[in-house]
Amino acid sequence: MKRILALVFFITLIWACSSDNGGEVPPADGGTDEPKEEPQEVSFERAPMLVNWADNIIIPAYTDFDSELENLTAAFENFNIDATTTNLIALREAWLTAYTKWQRISMFEIGPAESADFRFSMNTYPTDTDKINAHISSGSYDLTLSSNRASKGFPALDYLINGLGDSDEAIISKYTAPDKEALLTYTQAVLTDMNALTDQVVSDWQGSYRDTFVANDGASATASVDRFVNDYIFYFEKFLRAGKMGIPLGVFSGSPLPQNVEAFHEGEIANMLFLEGLQATQDFFNGKHYASTATGESLASYLDNLNTVKDGEDLKAVINNQLNKAREMVTSLDAFRTEIETNAPPTDMLLAYDEVQRIVPLLKVDMVSAMSISIDFVDADGD
Amino acid sequence: MTSFKKKYINKSTEAAPLAVFRILFGSMMFLSIARFWSYGWIDKLYIQPKFFFSYYGFEWIKPIGMYTYLLFGVCGAAAILIALGYKYRMAMLIFFLSFTYIELMDKTTYLNHYYFISGLSFLMLFLPANAYFSLDASQNPKRAFQQIPVWTINSLKLLLGIVYFYAGLAKLNSDWLLKAMPLKIWLPAKFDIPLLGNLLSQEWVQYAFSWVGAGYDLAIPFLLLYKKTRTFAFVLVVIFHVLTRVLFPIGMFPYIMIICTLIFFDASLHHKILTLVAKLFQIAKTKFDTGKAYVFQKNTIGQLKYAVVLLFFAFQVLVPFRYLLYPGELFWTEQGYRFSWRVMLTEKSGYAQFKIVDGVSQRWFYVDNSDFLSPFQEKQMAFQSDFILEYAHYLKEYFENDGHQKVAVYVDSQVALNGRLSTTFVDPKVDLAQEKESFKHKNWIIPFKDEIKGF
């Protein structure tokens, strides 16, 4: 008896110490209470979902963004040579295209993007116009410093191509003035910084990080799915909901902050940028391949597989319906800046914000609870 | 009655089991404290947060800045003294007080097993655990005894029995037994565990785990009590607790429970353990084998001790049923949920967004919880009504100090329980700043939409 006891103890101890190995991915829940037409063993594997995320969504989106950023750089080079209204308009168009594509990748703040501080470096707004002006006049700045986050990226370009004057002529005049070199050099520097960061992130993903990401297909707090879902929800809550709508609306400060609208100097496109970001999060949720109608394994299909757990309440549909409702509400708004500056209080936009807000608990409570993913992983004991 | 009293209370028995219990308890507690410290949790849980959630009536107990480390140090040192049996009663008192203080500093970290340790160390204050194989006994032969009244060991068995049995009772509910919830959510997520991983996603396995788990908790105290099933029961204890350790992040608790159940074994086993310890540390075990029996004083103080121990057990037996005094579903409102051995019973999470309204200017805004709470605190706060209320009061005070006037606090909260879709938890129209904490029912909790039958 003693030997058996010792053996049991020994085996279980070894076992206890050997968790977190990743390993193969077994099928997830299968059974239902109600017999369905096909009582088959349903399975869900995390590895194919990670592959779908990486190969069909993340990497194509990054690659596309990278080429749009090159187009933007080329448009600036034209403008640099010949600062005409036509070239300024072309530069703005390229900026807008790249900024729109950015909304497709901003949520992927994991791995290379996280270590590059990609999101804050590319899109911290409101941009610090005083700092930008100071940099231009002093001519000495190091844009790689995190203290310069608010004087570079898309928002800095917004100021440089939209905010330097009231009219195109006024803006052009800055770029043709005797001291234009400092301004052009700074704009150039902002673009160089953006390109360098993007190249780094894209090449890491195209290189070894993709395999690292996909191989980490376990279920611990450090596994790719758990971490990414956390990052995804964090993006939705802090950057999409709060950053693009809530903060400018003043829902966290008590009074509206129109200057905190994304692309403030342009003034019209914040809605479009928000909607692109919302669509990107929804497409990601549904596993929709980048720039395609095909879909693959996703959070939505994961929820479908777990749906038996939820007593037939279709959480996937609930989330998609709420996302659609939020999009409809935001689509019917005027430009965010106009809504905020002309209405006191901006009732329509507040109502639209409420619909965006309703998505957060669905993701943060219902979805992660169904998947047993811990939110903001807390390293402490449970009981 | 007198024969019962004789057999289970006053009869003298070997002191060795209690001595082994004391040594293992002290050692495990020291390890637990050291582990807690080494993981940086003192800083993370008790130094960094700006705000701490208090237990009702214990609002004066807060972390004490950098001295919190000292508190843990004292607690750890007391645990060593307990293991050594040196100035046992003082060490036990210091341990009980410091450990309980630590647990009361922030209810975010509430765990049933911390409560178990507090209760156990309170009980041990009254037990002559230093009578045998201790420094106290070795230094003062007058106070060395080989025999102790049997109730001192039985009381430990009773406490363990209560913990298991009540944990089993709590599992007799429709979610656990008929829906295999929350194991149906938790087990499939552990697909990457070697050997078992594949099985955990099978529905029958989830039901089996639920039913076997409930049966285990209810039966194990009795299986441990009967000599014929005792060894088998201990094997079950080891398997069960190691399994829970593999599946869930429950720290030291499984090991503590495994070690505690040794108290059910005969003194012969404990003598073997002590012989081993004696050999290891070159202690003359024979000098403790005095044959003397410890007798509790028959005076008022002695009687008082019995009374306190009896009261302690009355408390233990009754308190888990206090939920019956509250209306509504216990798992939803959690009124009467803690201190009741309801272990790993619910998969619950929530989301709470607070709205601050200035009563004079009528201006309003939402609170970013991460400005005030750690992620852990926010997670715990979002689905527990007493946390929500305490936090709402804190927000009122904070924003009134910040220049706002007559602040009203509303919360938009969604809670999901055991796989149900989330629904509204707190009435969003109620100004929480006006509500007071008490033992009374919180009528601003929106009633549970479903029904869970059972204990």
Image (cartoon, grey):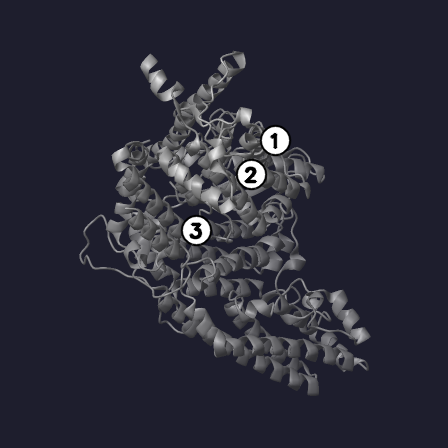
Kindly state the secondary structure of the residue where label 1 is placed: loop
Label disc, if present, on residue B455 of the rendered structure: none
Label disc, if present, on residue A362 of the rendered structure: 3
In the depicted structure, whether residue B431 falls above or below residue A321: above
Question: Horizontally, is A101 left or right of A78 in the view?
Answer: left
Quadrant assignment for the C terminus of chain A: top left
Residue A62 shows up from this direction: yes
Q: Chain of mark 3?
A: A
Nearest the camera: B19 or B440?
B19
Kindly state the secondary structure of the residue where label 2 is placed: helix
Residue that label 2 marks: B79
In the depicted structure, whether residue B71 falls above or below residue A158: above
Q: Quadrant of residue B390?
A: top right
How many other residues sit within 10 Å of disc 3, few (<14), some (14-19) or many (≥20)?
A: many
What's the amino acid at mark 3? Leu
What's the amino acid at mark 1? Glu
**Pointers 1 and 2 within a single chain:** yes
Residue drawn at point x = 58 percent, y = 63 percent: A270
Kindly state the secondary structure of the residue where label 3 is placed: helix
| Distance from Cα at disc 1 to Cα at disc 3 | 34 Å
Label disc, if present, on residue B59 of the rendered structure: 1
Residue drawn at point x = 53 percent, y = 12 percent: B300
In the depicted structure, whether residue A162 falls above or below residue B364: below
Nearest the camera: A280 or B268?
B268
